[in-house]
Amino acid sequence: MTIATADVPAIAGGKPIKTTPFTKLPRYGEEELNELREALAQQNLFYAAGKKVKELEKQFATLRGATHAVACSSGTAAIHSATMAVGISPDDEVIVPCITDMGTILPVMWQGAVPVFADLDPKTYNLDPKAVEAAITDKTKAIIAVHLAGNPCDLTALKQIADKHKLILIEDCAQAHGCHYNEKPVGIVGQIGCYSFNEFKHIACGDGGIAITSDDKLAQRLRLATDKCYDRSAGVAQRQGPFMANNYRMTELQGAVALAQVRKLDSIISRRQSWCGRLTKRLANLPGLQLPAVQERGSHSYWFYMMRVDPQVLGAKADDFAKAISKEGVPCSAHYIGQPIYKYPLFVNHSAFSRGEHHYSRVDYTKVKNATAEAILETCVILPVNESYSDADLEDTVKAFERVVTYFQAKKSA
């Protein structure tokens, strides 16, 4: 098979398909400035004395279908506060996925508990319920379900497993703003749902987080967990807290920006879903690509667009394919986090602390193997997504994929 000159990919000397930048509009504007002005006019930026964090919590809880929301300094802080609130303690085991951010894992370890890595579904890239159940021991205290890239986990199965074994289910929704399962927002099936307002998430305030729950007692413990166990309820001012907590407070400035961002969320998600949904349809017939598979009964909010390549069918490995797409002017990377978290030096070398042992030291992580997760990382490629991407950006992306796939198919046939 020969390739017409006009179809020679950039990686082989052709002209790139996309020669203009992807559309990206400012994410912050007058709405955020108005909220910031009001926050500053209070002359007090402490969350307990101001109005912005309280209003953010109220609106976010309503938006996500929860009774309570507790804002904090980051998504990691939200997860750590959740582990404190539910009583994760030294030598407990917590089941987690190995493809996630360290912000999912570190809170478990700060509690002295042991991360137990369970394998993933090969199509959704989220926890495989069968693998989760197989990982449960008499030390298991909780499951942290990560809705990777905005694709919901199989929450029905995970909740059934958690209830059967009397385990806590915490949802890591850091990448899943606007994500739904069974037509309801993620974060409300488990006891606590944790979101991030990091600069690179769907909505942001530079850095920040929020935890939601409909359990009154857990909400109270979440609040204490974010504020050194200081009870700042009206007329209380109690500093003698019942458990060890941290200072994870959100400021009024962060709250003001996040509040304005929350009001934009529906538009942001609908535009991402439209663009990525159309991309999937346009790429559906290209050989050698496994496109994002949305969890049954779920809706994907596309923090990024993650797919896999089949090297034997495509004629190229993930690295080569990502490089070729990037050369066409379409940003693309391979392998996401590179390797499973259990292969990080922190786990292989048990180097959490310079001196002394941690309970996770009893696990030989060099013997841990999540075969499906490793195969996912070996074959996955990632496209960044922004709600501002245009129809022209879509057309260029499709053309780049068609050109590159045709090129590798021709090389394979030669």
Image: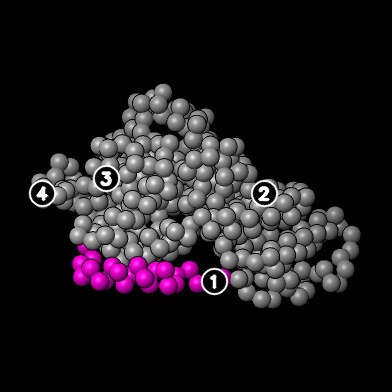
Pointers 3 and 1 in contact (C-beta within 8 Å): no
The quarter in which the N terminus is drawn is: bottom right
The quarter in which the C terminus is drawn is: bottom right
Q: Residue at x 88, y 68 (%)?
A: 4
Residue 359, image x, y percentages: 29, 39
Q: Secondary structure at mark 1?
A: loop
Binning the other alpha carbons within 10 Å of mark 1 as few (below 14), some (14 to 19) or many (20 upward) gives: few
Amino acid type of the residue tagged 3 in the rendering: Leu
- The residue labelled by disc 4 is 235
3D distance between C-alphas at marks 4 and 3: 19 Å
Amino acid type of the residue tagged 2 in the rendering: Leu
Look at the image and tell me whether residue 115 can be seen. Answer: no
- The residue labelled by disc 2 is 291
Q: Residue at x 43, y 36 (%)?
A: 189
- The residue labelled by disc 3 is 222
Q: Which is nearer the N-term, disc 2 or disc 3?
A: 3
Residue 25 — which label?
Answer: 1
Report if residue 28 lies within the magenta region: yes
**Res. 274 image quadrant:** bottom right
Residue 358, image x, y percentages: 28, 43
Q: Nearer the viewer, mark 3 or mark 1?
A: 1
Q: Nearer the viewer, mark 1 or mark 2?
A: 1
Residue 188, image x, y percentages: 41, 39
Q: Secondary structure at mark 3?
A: helix
**Res. 41 image quadrant:** bottom left
**Res. 392 image quadrant:** bottom right
Binning the other alpha carbons within 10 Å of mark 3 as few (below 14), some (14 to 19) or many (20 upward) gives: many
Q: Secondary structure at mark 4?
A: loop
Start-end of magenta stretch: 24-46
Q: Residue furthest top?
A: 164
Q: Which is nearer the N-term, disc 2 or disc 4?
A: 4
Binning the other alpha carbons within 10 Å of mark 4 as few (below 14), some (14 to 19) or many (20 upward) gives: few
